[in-house]
Image (spheres, helix red, strand yellow):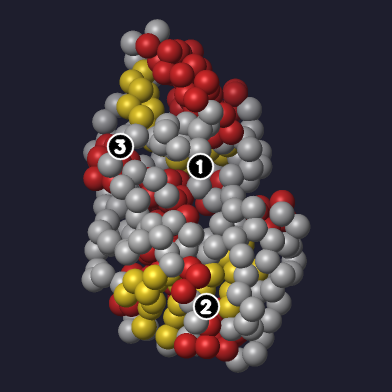
Amino acid sequence: MKVALTCPATIFPAEYGGSEKTVGYRAMELDKMGHEVHLYSAGPYKPANGKLIIWSGNVGDVHTGEYDIIDNNCQSEFSCHNQINTVQGPFYPKRNVVCISHSQAKGMGFHPNCRVIHYGTDINYFTPLFEKEDWFLFFSRIVHGKGVHIAVELAKLIGFKLKIVGEDQKYVDVTYVEHIKNTCKTLPNVEYVGTVSNEKALSYLQHAKALLFPQFWGEAFGLVMIEALACGTPVIAGGSNGAPPEVIENGKTGFLCNDFADYIKAVKSIDQINPKVCREEAVKRWSARRMAEDYLKLYDAVIRGESW
């Protein structure tokens, strides 16, 4: 099958890009499965594993008639029928909509007239360590809705060691970032790290006792959760809205929390979660191969003339 994959940004930026990563993973897996993949993005794809995918130019260079399917991840549709449109942001396509979680589908009004394919990750890159160090990790963009202040308050109250890692330069409120940095300076058990490379990110995810993901803004997915699970690291996540209840099995791969008291209980109970089970679930449910296979089913459906 000849596939055009579109993405508005460069695939696998050095320090940022969750949705871009998943497009790269999809390209990598489709290529491994023998399909001809052409990438249209802001720059070439440089995978951690696998060979270089054909970079055919920017999104505006796509000639739709040359491909069996257009796998579109940009915020504008093509004028053809052989396309699917994955919603990676504030994008409201009119046909063949793919959402990245059921929560996103309902929240943006696409349910039930859409398909849902959850993200997958490179489980051969995010490898596990089962002997954990005695500290917790917050790893996400440093914005209010991701709940980094909740993680800091938990560390302040309970006294556990916390490392804060994440993008703090792009797409952030500088005032909020500075508030978090200044608060961390007053807490000897909290280390503010900030932006790191992909290689250092892997090490943090592998060694942490657990990932704190106290989002409350209705996260569309949260790729870092499945990266953590692949590393054998349990996840303590905000479960009152967003995608975490679709990803984390409460009491098995982590804990879902609805209020601050839940977070306190979860932190104190984290040793009940088996890192090996986290890894097993990641391999079973959250691989890039599973994601690519799910997309292939939709490709075949569209090529057969189906639409939704």
Of the two numbered discs 1 and 2 in the rendering, the one whose residue sits closer to the viewer:
2
Residue at the disc numbered 2: 70
Q: What whole-number distance in Å separates the C-alpha atoms at marks 1 and 3? A: 30 Å
Three-letter amino acid code at the position of disc 3: Val
Of callouts 1 and 2, which one flags the residue occurring earlier in the amino acid sequence?
A: 2
Residue positioned 33% across, 11% down in the render: 188
Q: Residue furthest top?
A: 186
Residue 114 % position (x, y): 68, 69
Residue 295 % position (x, y): 51, 74
Q: What whole-number distance in Å separates the C-alpha atoms at marks 1 and 2? A: 40 Å
Residue at the disc numbered 1: 251
Residue positioned 47% across, 88% down in the render: 66
Three-letter amino acid code at the position of disc 2: Ile
Residue positioned 24% across, 71% down in the render: 51
**139 up-or-down from 232: above or below:** above
Residue 156 appears in which quarter of the rendering? top left
Residue 74 % position (x, y): 55, 63
